[in-house]
Structures are given as structure tokens and as C-alpha cells.
């Protein structure tokens, strides 16, 4: 069964992904004018769905687009897509755009319904061999706009940053702005120095990651000192450990940065503990339902 036959949701209908159609005048297509979320699903149970839907609301407020659905309505649609999928561990993608007008005009259209789309794919997990060695990253200057706290579909700068990594055989590009480490092209970044976990502050320069919050909660719960503050580039480069976090990558050690080893060049002790705590936490949450 190919991906294209999985059921998706589009504007009120449930249909095979391959049959879903939108207008070429959709503002998501023309302007990148829309919001999105990616929600991990373990054993058919969405993880932190409330937090993802709250962040969706923040994004929609930030771009002045009314949320077409209540959290309960989102959850019901997501549940139906998840139940219909032939795989248990999933990554649910949802997107809302400002819809398709009859003309192309930058200004908001009047009386045009939003486009609402949900689809799911198998959750691609990191192979054990990759987790054991960690991944390589490169740095680049952050040339994105100043509303990086919004999860919008206009991702060209992130796309180029991520490809910059792939072109060099690396997993991620870590973005630097004004001499500070901000985040990855599609992940948040943590630094460990002398046993303390450092995280950049959630402000307009970075996406407030759902996984980022889980990691800080787990650090507090397990007595790991953590400090949220700006991280100068030198601290990134002299870190004992560097991690990337996201809903799909979870907690993944970065063991090489711009061709130089991070710390000992292998995943550090705190990365391994945090990964274990994260798995435990997932298991507990999923058992509770
Ligand atoms: N990306 N920063 C950026 C720029 C991201 O795109 C993401 C996630 C994160 C991590 O956020 P979270 O922990 O809530 O997944 C940080 C998703 C997975 C994506 O675009 O596919």
C-alpha cells in the first residue's frame, strides 16, 4: 500500500491522498501564506497534541488568520486520519492557508474560506547506528525574517539552510544571528557545558519547540541544571555536547560541527540519558492514554 492511498483530510472531506486537489491560486502556493504543525504519533496516540494545537493558535494569531476548527474538532479529524493509516507510528502534518481567491493580490482576500489539510506518514525513526555515532552539522548565518516564532509554511530560508547541510553530507545546519546560536533549520539546539544544559530563550528568533519544552521539563525532573539564555557562537563551538531536538528527531546528538568534533566526538553522557528519559516519558504518557 503506497503513501498516496493513505487517507487525508481536505476541507471537510476524507479521501485518498492521491486524489486530494487544491487550486493553484491557493495562497499557500502563491505566497506561502499559511500555518502548519507536525505532530508525532506513537502507537496511534498523538504526543503532546494540546501543545501543538496551542502553538498552531499562536501562529494563526500571529498571521491574523482565524482558526477554522476548535481544538476538539482538530483532534477528532486527526484521530480519524491516524486510525485509517496502515502504520502505527506516524507523523501527522496539518496545514491551514488563507485559501484561494479568484485573483492574485497580496492583501488578505475577503470572504474566502481557508484551506485545511491533514495527512499522515510513517514516523521515520533514527537508525540505532546513527544514534550511536551522532550526526554532523554545519553552521550558517540566519537570514530568516524576525517572526521565526511562527510555524508558517513559508520555509524557503529553512529549505536552503537544510540543503546546505545535506550538500556537505551533514544532518543539520545550525543558524547563527548576531553572534548567537538560534536553532537548526528544522530543529531546536541545546548545548551542554560542564554538566549544565544551556538553551536559547524562546523569542521571535526561534520556533518554540514542543520537544524543547519536554527536554527542559525532563532536565528539571531529573535534577540536571539548566539555564535558558543567549548562547554566543563561541559557547556552541566549545561545548561538551550539542543536541538537536524536534518532534521527528526527538533528541539527537550532534557530534561534529563544521568538520570538528564536538567534545569527544561521540554522543555525550547527558545526551544518552536525556534520550532514555525521553523514551521513558513517552512510554508513561502513552500508557496513561
Ligand atoms: N520542524 N525549529 C524549527 C525551525 C523547526 O522547523 C522545528 C520542527 C523545530 C522543533 O519543534 P518541535 O519540537 O515542536 O517539533 C524547531 C518540524 C518537525 C518540521 O518542520 O518538519
Image (spheres, rainbow, N blue to C red):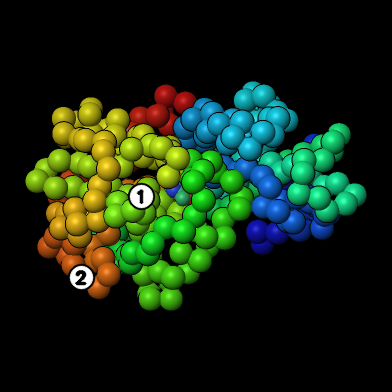
Residue in the foreground of this view, choosing between 143 and 91: 143
- Looking at the image, which residue is at 59% across and 34% down? 62
- Looking at the image, which residue is at 61% across and 53% down? 154
Residue 83 appears left or right of 165: right
List the single residue furthest toward the left: 194
Give the number of the disc on residue 260. Answer: 2
Q: Position of residue 10 (x, y in %)?
A: 76, 44
Going from the N terminus, do you reach mark 2 or mark 1 first? Answer: 1
Residue in the foreground of this view, choosing between 206 and 119: 206
User: Up-down: is 180 above or below 166?
Assistant: above
Q: Residues within 10 Å of mark 2 (few under 14, many from 20)?
A: few
Name which quarter of the figure residue 174 lies in.
Answer: bottom left
Q: CA distance from mark 2 to mark 1?
A: 20 Å
- As helix, strand or loop, the secondary structure at mark 2 comes to strand
User: Up-down: is 154 above or below 113?
Assistant: below
User: Up-down: is 178 above or below 64?
Assistant: below
Determine which residue is flagged by label 1. Answer: 182
- As helix, strand or loop, the secondary structure at mark 1 comes to strand
Q: Position of residue 257 (x, y in %)?
A: 26, 65
Residue 275 appears left or right of 241: right
- Looking at the image, which residue is at 14% across and 47% down? 193
Q: Position of residue 33 (x, y in %)?
A: 68, 47
Amino acid at each position: 500500500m503506497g503513501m498516496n492511498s493513505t487517507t487525508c483530510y481536505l476541507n471537510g472531506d476524507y479521501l485518498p491522498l492521491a486524489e486530494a486537489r487544491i487550486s493553484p491560486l491557493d495562497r499557500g502556493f502563491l505566497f506561502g501564506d499559511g500555518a502548519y504543525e507536525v505532530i508525532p504519533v506513537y502507537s496511534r496516540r498523538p504526543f503532546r497534541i494540546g501543545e501543538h494545537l496551542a502553538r498552531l493558535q499562536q501562529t494563526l494569531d500571529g498571521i491574523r488568520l482565524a482558526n477554522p476548527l476548535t481544538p476538539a474538532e482538530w483532534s477528532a479529524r486527526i484521530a480519524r486520519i491516524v486510525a485509517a493509516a496502515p502504520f502505527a507510528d506516524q507523523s501527522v502534518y496539518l496545514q491551514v492557508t488563507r485559501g484561494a481567491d479568484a485573483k492574485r493580490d497580496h492583501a488578505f482576500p475577503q470572504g474566502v474560506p481557508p484551506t485545511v489539510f491533514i495527512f499522515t506518514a510513517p514516523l521515520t525513526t533514527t537508525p540505532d547506528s546513527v544514534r550511536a555515532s551522532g550526526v554532523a552539522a554545519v553552521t550558517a548565518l540566519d537570514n530568516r525574517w524576525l517572526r521565526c516564532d511562527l510555524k508558517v509554511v513559508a520555509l524557503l530560508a529553512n529549505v536552503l539552510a537544510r540543503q546546505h547541510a545535506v550538500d556537505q553530507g551533514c544532518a543539520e545546519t545550525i543558524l547563527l544571528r548576531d553572534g548567537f546560536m538560534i536553532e537548526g533549520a528544522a530543529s531546536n539546539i541545546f548545548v551542554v557545558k560542564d554538566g549544565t544544559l544551556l538553551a536559547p530563550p524562546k523569542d521571535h528568533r526561534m520556533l518554540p519547540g514542543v520537544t524543547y519544552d519536554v527536554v527542559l521539563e525532563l532536565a528539571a525532573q531529573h535534577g540536571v541544571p539548566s539555564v535558558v539564555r543567549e548562547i554566543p557562537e563561541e559557547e556552541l563551538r566549545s561545548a561538551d555536547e550539542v543536541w538537536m531536538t524536534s518532534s521527528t528527531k526527538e533528541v539527537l546528538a550532534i557530534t561534529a560541527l563544521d568538520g570538528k568534533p564536538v567534545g569527544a566526538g561521540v554522543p555525550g553522557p547527558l545526551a544518552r540519558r536525556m534520550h532514555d528519559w525521553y523514551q521513558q516519558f513517552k512510554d508513561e504518557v502513552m500508557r496513561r492514554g
